[in-house]
């Protein structure tokens, strides 16, 4: 599976661990940065390109992370075609995929232990979208608003 990943300085070290974990599990990972620590870097510069690449390849997924994951998720969701979910539990990881067909997971690296975060990523990637009509309909409404600004 193709995975695009981006973070900020707060997620830099953890991003490297996620990349190793994903590659060890056979995934093709593109690192959109940062590639070195800069306490003043800005997450949109790294998370938006990861989201753009994810949206451009519907078979891919994205991972964005920072201290809380909030800003990273907001930045990713500005990209048309991205449904980024801030995930903090196994249940939210599953529901993001099952009900929302989320294609980007956002994680707060400072909020959870490493092993748990890796389990969140694995759960997210392994959970299929249900394709239930109600979920398809709702995602369609979001996509319509995204394209023409009308509900």
Image (cartoon, rainbow, N blue to C red):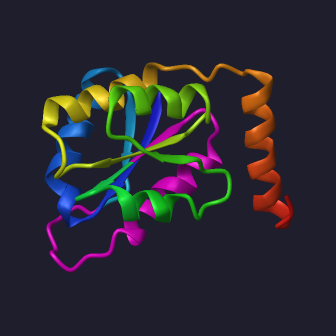
Q: Is residue 23 visible?
A: no
Count of numbered circles in the view: 0
Residue 46 image position (x, y, % from top left): 38, 64
Query: In the rendered view, does 3 fall on the left or right side of 146?
Result: left
Q: Of 5 and 69, which appears nearest the observer?
A: 69
The residue lying at 24 percent from left, 38 percent from top is 18
The residue lying at 83 percent from left, 54 percent from top is 144
The residue lying at 58 percent from left, 47 percent from top is 83
Query: In the rendered view, does 104 fall on the left or right side of 12?
Result: right
The residue lying at 67 percent from left, 51 percent from top is 81
Query: In the rendered view, does 23 fall on the left or right side of 37?
Result: right
Query: Taking 56 as reference, is 127 above or below it?
Result: above
Q: Is residue 68 visible?
A: yes
Whether the magenta-drawn stretch holds residue 37 is answered as yes
Image quarter for residue 132? top right
Which quadrant of the figure contains the C terminus?
bottom right
Q: Which residues are magenta?
A: 34-63
Image quarter for residue 87? top left
Residue 80 image position (x, y, % from top left): 67, 58
Whether the magenta-drawn stretch holds residue 66 is answered as no
Q: Of 23 and 91, which appears nearest the observer?
A: 91
Query: Taking 3 as reference, is 10 above or below it?
Result: below
Query: Taking 48 as reference, is 22 above or below it?
Result: above
Residue 150 image position (x, y, % from top left): 86, 63
| Residue lying at the far bottom of the rendered structure | 40
Residue 79 image position (x, y, % from top left): 60, 61
């Amino acid at each position: 599976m193709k995975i695009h990943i981006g973070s900020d300085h707060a997620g830099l070290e953890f991003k490297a661990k996620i990349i190793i974990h994903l590659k060890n599990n056979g995934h093709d990972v593109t690192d959109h940065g940062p590639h070195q620590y800069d306490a003043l870097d800005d997450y949109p510069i790294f998370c938006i390109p990861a989201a753009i690449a994810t949206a451009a390849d519907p078979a891919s997924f994205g991972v964005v992370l920072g201290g809380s994951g909030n800003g990273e998720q907001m930045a990713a969701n500005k990209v048309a075609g991205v449904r980024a979910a801030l995930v903090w539990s196994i249940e939210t990881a599953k529901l993001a995929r099952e009900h929302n067909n989320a294609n980007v997971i956002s994680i707060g690296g400072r909020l959870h232990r490493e092993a748990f975060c890796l389990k969140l990523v694995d759960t997210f990637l392994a959970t299929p979208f249900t394709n239930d009509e109600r979920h398809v309909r709702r995602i369609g409404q979001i996509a319509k608003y995204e394209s023409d600004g009308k509900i």
